[in-house]
Image (cartoon, rainbow, N blue to C red):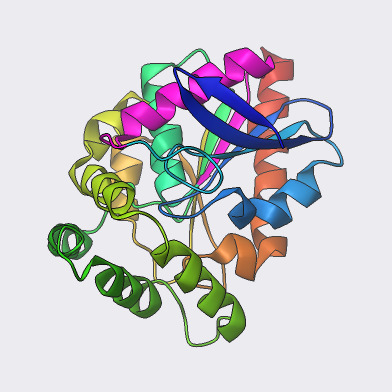
Amino acid sequence: MPLIDHDGVRLFFEEAGGGRPPLLLVHGWTCDHSFFAPQFEHFRRRHRVVAVDLRGHGRSDKPQQHYSMTAFADDLVWLCDQLGLERPVVIGHSMGGVIALELSSRYPQLPAAIVSVDSPIPPLAAARESMAAIAAMLRTPEYREAQRQFVSSMLFLPSDDAQRKARIVDLMSSAPQHVMASAFEHIASYDYTSAATSCRVPWLALSAHPPFVDLAHLRALCPHVLTGQTVGAGHFNQLEVPEQVNAMIERFLAVAVTAGAVAA
């Protein structure tokens, strides 16, 4: 089982394939590396692919601490150095996309590009208000029920696979409270404006339906961002319609990453 120790915290990762650019897959809030399983299997045919369990998640250690986007990004930078993962394309779902943006903002020389998959960058005004209320509920004894209600009622379409939905809700609600609450608080309070404005690498922002993202605001903050939206899938579109997500990432790699490297 591939575990690597970062200052006393063991981080789990899975690795396969070869070829450039390498891809680093970063899951979302209270999820784990398996939430990118279709992308891991698809892209390993032509790329070196690493999927990580963030600290506090999956098989990685879950210490009592603050779970900020900065701390997650620092772990990923360290992991890339340890694994020799040079100029990866960092692909993040939901919170993972926020972490990818934070990484590109603080360590602009590391990623070749970033992809955010239905990440709230920047969140709609209504979403910001609801996020604050949810963050408060996650500090109460009823935190698991609050999370289950939020995930099941807000993150799926009626057409999404019911069995998959049940598995996702169960897995996400099993996270420790200190991880669940702290990470969500940092998502809610993150400075999306500064991070998006400072992004200089190629960026693909994929949305689901309905989108969490204020697309007009995003394009104003980062004019070079490329955007796309999946059809017929809720927040977990990378699992529900992987063929759509994979195709858009493939095209992004071809026209914005590989072609850009050749031109440079």
Q: Which residues are magenta?
A: 64-92
Q: Vertical placement of 229 versus 248: above or below?
A: below
The quarter of the displayed image where residue 69 is located: top left
Residue 59, image x and y in percent? 56, 44
Q: Residue 156 magenta-drawn?
A: no
Q: Is residue 200 visible?
A: no
Any part of residue 110 in sight: yes
Residue at 17% in and 59% down: 125
**In this image, 23 relative to 136: left or right?**
right
Q: Position of residue 253 (x, y in %)?
A: 69, 36
Q: Residue 248: x percent and y percent?
A: 65, 52
Does the magenta portion include 75?
yes
Q: Is residue 188 above or below residue 87?
A: below
Which one is in front, 14 or 232?
Answer: 14
Residue at point 37%, 23% (across, down) = 105
The quadrant the C terminus occupies is: top right
Number of numbered discs present? 0
